[in-house]
């Protein structure tokens, strides 16, 4: 077996329990031509504090979806000073996260929001079909390969994730993205991810958090839990966007649409784009073939649904009375242009440091990594 090792470079992320580094692996042979390198993200924390990271590894190792950051293996290492670390190697996504994109660009245009939302939903539908709730959906945990389109979106950081049927676990996540039932400490499941997705869509459209005037986490949780409010809907957006947000931001969890149902909503469902990047979850009914197939969800004879407590929006009535020409215009304008991913982080060669060389690295047929500690 050829000698193996990996190098840890600069930190590219910091969470409450772990630090994420950019890393590379090298496998050398007798000739320079036999040497290969692979860049990956390395999430590390001390072994004594690694419970959530080990749970994340256990979940990711059983999952595979184009809209989910892949696990490449894990190892335990002994660092200088006798400190023992648990390290999780993950796919490296060079485009940064959605929150950074919003900070750079401000409010995103609606076609871009549709594309990003479609990709997030595809990943969530897959997770939920596997019995896992993410529990911390937000822009910082949505990584991008480029700009726009569901193929560019990857959900990251399952540190707060839980098995839906796993019994009682402590509530976790980010207060401003928690739904009422989580803020009250009652339950946390797949429906909580849908509320958080709605908050993230509001953030994409406005460039601000869903609760922009609330800065104190305790005050935020109290308002979310007991006030009866929902996040304010963005102005000047399409009726489809208003209706989509209304399906996500319902205070009662059982009234929120599932990720699979939302993937069939005309706000995100564009023929051709959705078909290429849909969820790998369980089979569902066929999606409508055009924006004219709104009857797929709401029968013609049904009255338009009115949600109590949802903010009024002048576009809401237009959604139920659009002309055929207008619906066709929306369908054909749903594409999202792609642009090259920006450089992520520049670094000098001298900033890299060798962390562990006595580690065996096996590169499989699918270019995945398996770390084995000697």
Image: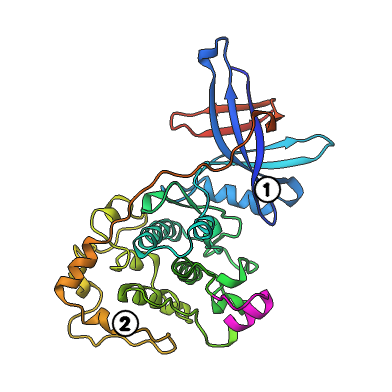
Q: Residue furthest bottom?
A: 308
- Tell me if residue 72 comes above or below residue 200 in the rendering: above
- Tell me if residue 58 comes above or below residue 256 in the rendering: above
Residue 110 sits in quarter = bottom left
Q: Earlier in the sequence, mark 2 or mark 1?
A: 1
Residue at point 31%, 67% (across, down): 267
Label 2 crowd (10 A; few <14 / some 14-19 / many >=20): some
**Residue of label 1:** 19
Return the residue nearer the eye: 292 or 348. 348
Q: Position of residue 314 (x, y in %)?
A: 33, 84
Q: Position of residue 11 (x, y in %)?
A: 66, 43
Q: Residue furthest right?
A: 81
Q: Is residue 219 magenta?
A: yes
* The C terminus: image quadrant: top right
Return the residue nearer the eye: 13 or 293. 13
* The N terminus: image quadrant: top right
Colouring of the image: rainbow
**Which secondary structure lies at badge 2?**
helix
Q: Position of residue 218 (x, y in %)?
A: 68, 77
Return the residue nearer the eye: 46 or 31. 31
Q: Residue furthest left?
A: 324
Return the residue nearer the eye: 181 or 149. 149
Residue at point 61%, 67% (across, down): 174
Residue at point 31%, 81% (across, down): 315
Range of the magenta residues? 211-224
The answer to whether mark 2 and mark 1 are in CB contact below 8 A is: no
Q: Position of residue 288 (x, y in %)?
A: 21, 65
Q: Which mark is residue 316?
A: 2
* 372 displayed left or right of 257: right
Q: Is residue 43 magenta?
A: no
């Amino acid at each position: 077996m050829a000698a193996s090792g990996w190098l840890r470079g600069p930190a590219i992320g910091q969470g409450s329990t772990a630090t994420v580094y950019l890393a590379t692996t090298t496998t050398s042979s007798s000739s320079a031509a036999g040497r290969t390198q692979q860049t990956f993200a390395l999430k590390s924390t001390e072994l004594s504090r690694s419970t959530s990271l080990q749970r994340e590894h256990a979940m990711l190792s059983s999952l595979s979806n184009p809209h989910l950051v892949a696990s490449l293996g894990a190892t335990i290492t002994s660092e200088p000073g006798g400190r023992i670390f648990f390290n999780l190697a993950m796919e490296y996504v060079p485009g940064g996260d959605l929150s950074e994109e919003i900070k750079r660009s401000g409010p995103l245009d609606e076609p871009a929001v549709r594309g990003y939302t479609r990709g997030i939903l595809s990943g969530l539908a897959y997770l939920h079909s596997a019995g896992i709730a993410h529990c911390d959906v937000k822009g910082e945990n949505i990584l991008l390969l480029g700009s726009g389109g569901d193929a560019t979106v990857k959900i990251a950081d399952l540190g707060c994730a839980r098995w839906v049927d796993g019994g009682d676990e402590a509530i976790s996540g980010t207060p401003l993205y928690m739904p009422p039932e989580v803020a009250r400490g009652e339950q946390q499941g797949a429906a909580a991810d849908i509320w958080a997705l709605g908050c993230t869509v509001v953030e994409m459209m406005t460039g601000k958090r869903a609760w922009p005037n609330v800065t104190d986490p305790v005050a935020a949780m109290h308002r979310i839990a007991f006030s009866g409010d929902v996040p304010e809907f963005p102005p000047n957006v399409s009726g489809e966007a208003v209706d989509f947000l209304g399906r996500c931001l319902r205070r009662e969890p059982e009234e929120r649409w599932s990720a699979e149902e939302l993937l069939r909503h005309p706000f995100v469902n564009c023929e051709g784009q959705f078909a290429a990047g849909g969820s790998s979850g369980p089979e569902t009914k066929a999606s409508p073939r055009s924006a004219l197939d709104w009857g797929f969800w709401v029968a013609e004879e049904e009255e338009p649904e009115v949600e109590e407590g949802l903010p009024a929006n002048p576009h809401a009535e237009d959604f139920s009375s659009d002309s055929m020409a207008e619906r066709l215009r929306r369908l054909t304008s749903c594409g999202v242009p792609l642009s090259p991913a920006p450089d992520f982080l520049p670094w000098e060669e001298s900033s890299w440091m060798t962390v562990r060389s006595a580690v065996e690295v096996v590169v499989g047929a699918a270019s995945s990594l398996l770390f084995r500690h000697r």
